[in-house]
Amino acid sequence: AQTVTQSQPEMSVQEAETVTLSCTYDTSESDYYLFWYKQPPSRQMILVIRQEAYKQQNATENRFSVNFQKAAKSFSLKISDSQLGDAAMYFCAYRRTSYDKVIFGPGTSLSVIP
Amino acid sequence: NAGVTQTPKFRVLKTGQSMTLLCAQDMNHEYMYWYRQDPGMGLRLIHYSVGEGTTAKGEVPDGYNVSRLKKQNFLLGLESAAPSQTSVYFCASSYSITSGGQETQYFGPGTRLLVL
């Protein structure tokens, strides 16, 4: 069975600094999708970034980028120039391509210090 | 586009009462999902639907029923609410793989349910 692990329950970063959130997953599939979702205090789930496993190039979305290490089954999220609005719960998620269940990690709570 | 909407936003139930949560999407997505979110456990899939008239069980289906009579709506029912069902419920939708659309799920704003 697939699992998603986020080993950092809480993280903090100084405003304007860079922070990296860790995620590892377990799968026997070779083709799949990985996501980072952000959940601010409003509780809305917001897609931050997605990565296709068949692509070697790491996905980037403005200040957000990932370090995808397929062999190590690692998918970390880097937030550059952190802003107060980045404070939220961040969930790493995995989705097989053969069917559409998404498996979420337990989340990392990110605080941004002014 | 309103995206994914959920009704109600918050509800308090007594043990044994029943209720239905409504999810609606206006993106013509084939797939729809119901998750529950509990502290420290991330999101867990309750039920999902791959098309109008079809439903399937997720990770934690017990105590819930669903229906997808129309493509744009996905209903989650609690027949006899229990305190263990106190949670935040999220609905999501996505295109199917075969439609050639995105695999990303779009989430609603969530429904807070408190069962006393």
Image: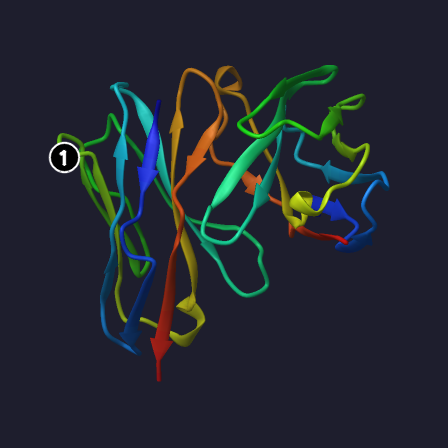
Chain at numbered mark 1: A
Give the camera-side residue of B91 and B102: B91
Q: In terms of secondary structure, where does tag 1 sit?
A: loop
Mark 1, Cα crowd under 10 Å, few <14 / some 14-19 / many 20+, is few
| Outermost left residue | A71
- Compared with residue B45, is residue B99 higher up or lower down, i.e. above or below? above
Give the camera-side residue of B49 and A59: B49
Q: Position of residue B13 (x, y in %)?
A: 82, 50
Q: Position of residue A102 (x, y in %)?
A: 46, 31
- Compared with residue B54, is residue A83 higher up or lower down, i.e. above or below? below
Q: Position of residue A36 (x, y in %)?
A: 38, 47
- Compared with residue B113, is residue B74 higher up or lower down, i.e. above or below? above
The residue carrying mark 1 is A72
Is residue B3 visible to the viewer in this orientation of the structure?
no
- When asked about the image quadrant of residue B32, the answer is top right
**Residue found 35% across the figure and 84% down from its top:** A114
Q: Is residue A8 left or right of residue B25?
A: left
**Residue found 60% across the figure and 21% down from its top:** B57
Amino acid carrying mark 1 in the image: Ala
Location of the N terminus of chain A by quadrant is top left
Q: Position of residue B47 (x, y in %)?
A: 62, 27
Is residue B67 visible to the viewer in this orientation of the structure?
yes
Q: Is residue A11 left or right of residue B30?
A: left
Q: Is residue B46 left or right of residue A19?
A: right
| Outermost bottom residue | A114
**Residue found 40% across the figure and 52% down from its top:** A107
**Residue found 65% across the figure and 27% down from its top:** B62
